[in-house]
Image (tube, grey):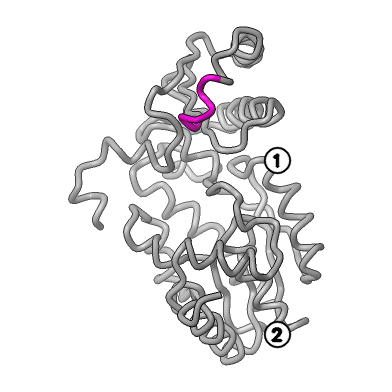
């Protein structure tokens, strides 16, 4: 570990000691897993992880989150979030994440009050400042702390420290909720979320780890695969399995994005001035 990263690590530990006790929104992603690990190592039983469950949260991610929270040895609760009941969320505007995060943080605040815990925290990092993140408005409104961000952690830092601490998530692909698979303005339904989750679960079962199934209009699936894995994906037998599975889910047109997998591809249509907000 470099001196710079070691300093950030100590800063993170010191910040957590100042918080004394904390509720952490835990997704099982790379960032929140590192935050939970360091928090538990530093504060022990004064940390409560909360896993938010809804149709937007992939089943596989939920299973992995349970495994991770038990591996770390953290106390945890599960809470159902109802963002899909919010008409503003279902309309899928460009600030959709604001409504989702508002719902989650509201539930975390209720838990914090119930357990007499002053602070709630999320796994935001420095890299998030350079991305389109309307959910950050909800964080500010509800006074959510971001210890990794406050300590200067980048994604590279998170992965390096995670590896140093023996976390299996150190090389895990970036996670995003299932609502990110829909073009802005295209209505999000529970059934459509289920279709995407099942489609991605199937592709994951074929051995792919970094990919997305984007849901366009009512009948089109646009699949993003790592460019290095495109030859494997195009093998006749495997390609036919994917086509058959996605057609069974109700998709008529199954397309392959030649640009390959990249995070935030649905943001590519947004004007630059919007992305910088």
> Residue 67, relative to residue 239: is it above or below?
below
Question: Which disc number belongs to residue 136?
Answer: none
> Residue 246, relative to residue 150: is it above or below?
above
- Find disc 1 in the rendering and name its residue: 59
> Residue 235, relative to residue 193: is it above or below?
above
50 vs 101, left or right, is right
Secondary structure character of the magenta stretch overall:
helix
Nearer to us of marks 1 and 2 is: 2
The quadrant of the rendering that contains the C terminus is bottom left
Residue found 75% across the figure and 62% down from its top: 69
61 vs 31, left or right, is right
- Find disc 2 in the rendering and name its residue: 43
Residue found 49% across the figure and 57% down from its top: 101
Q: Where is residue 207 in the image (x, y as percent from the top left)?
A: 68, 30
Range covered by the magenta-colored residues: 226-231
Locate residue 167: give its quadrant: bottom right
Q: Position of residue 132 (x, y in %)?
A: 33, 52
Sequence order check, earlier mark of 1 and 2: 2
The quadrant of the rendering that contains the N terminus is bottom right
Q: What element carries label 2?
A: helix
């Amino acid at each position: 570990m470099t001196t710079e990263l070691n300093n950030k690590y100590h800063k993170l530990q010191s910040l957590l000691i100042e918080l004394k006790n904390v509720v952490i929104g835990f997704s099982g992603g790379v960032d929140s897993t590192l935050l939970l690990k360091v928090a538990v190592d530093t504060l022990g039983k004064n940390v409560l992880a909360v896993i938010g469950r809804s149709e937007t949260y992939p089943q596989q991610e939920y299973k992995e989150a349970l495994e991770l929270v038990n591996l770390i040895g953290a106390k945890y609760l599960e809470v159902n979030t109802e963002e899909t009941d919010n008409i503003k969320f279902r309309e899928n505007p460009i600030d959709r994440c604001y409504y989702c995060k508002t719902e989650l943080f509201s539930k975390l605040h209720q838990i914090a009050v119930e357990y007499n815990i002053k602070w709630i925290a999320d796994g935001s990092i420095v890299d998030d400042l350079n991305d389109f993140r309307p959910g950050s408005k909800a964080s500010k409104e509800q006074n959510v702390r971001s210890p990794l961000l406050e300590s200067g952690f980048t994604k590279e830092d998170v992965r390096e420290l995670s590896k140093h601490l023996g976390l299996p998530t150190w090389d895990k692909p970036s996670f995003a909720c299932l609502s990110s698979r829909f073009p802005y303005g295209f209505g999000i339904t529970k059934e459509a979320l289920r279709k995407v989750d099942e489609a991605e679960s199937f592709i994951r079962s074929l051995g792919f780890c970094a990919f997305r199934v984007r849901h366009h209009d009512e009948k089109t699936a646009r699949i993003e695969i790592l460019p290095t894995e495109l030859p494997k994906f195009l093998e006749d037998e495997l390609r036919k399995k994917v086509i058959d599975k996605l057609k069974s889910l109700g998709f008529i047109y199954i397309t392959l994005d030649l640009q390959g997998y990249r995070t935030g591809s649905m943001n590519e249509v947004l004007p630059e001035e919007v992305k910088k907000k």
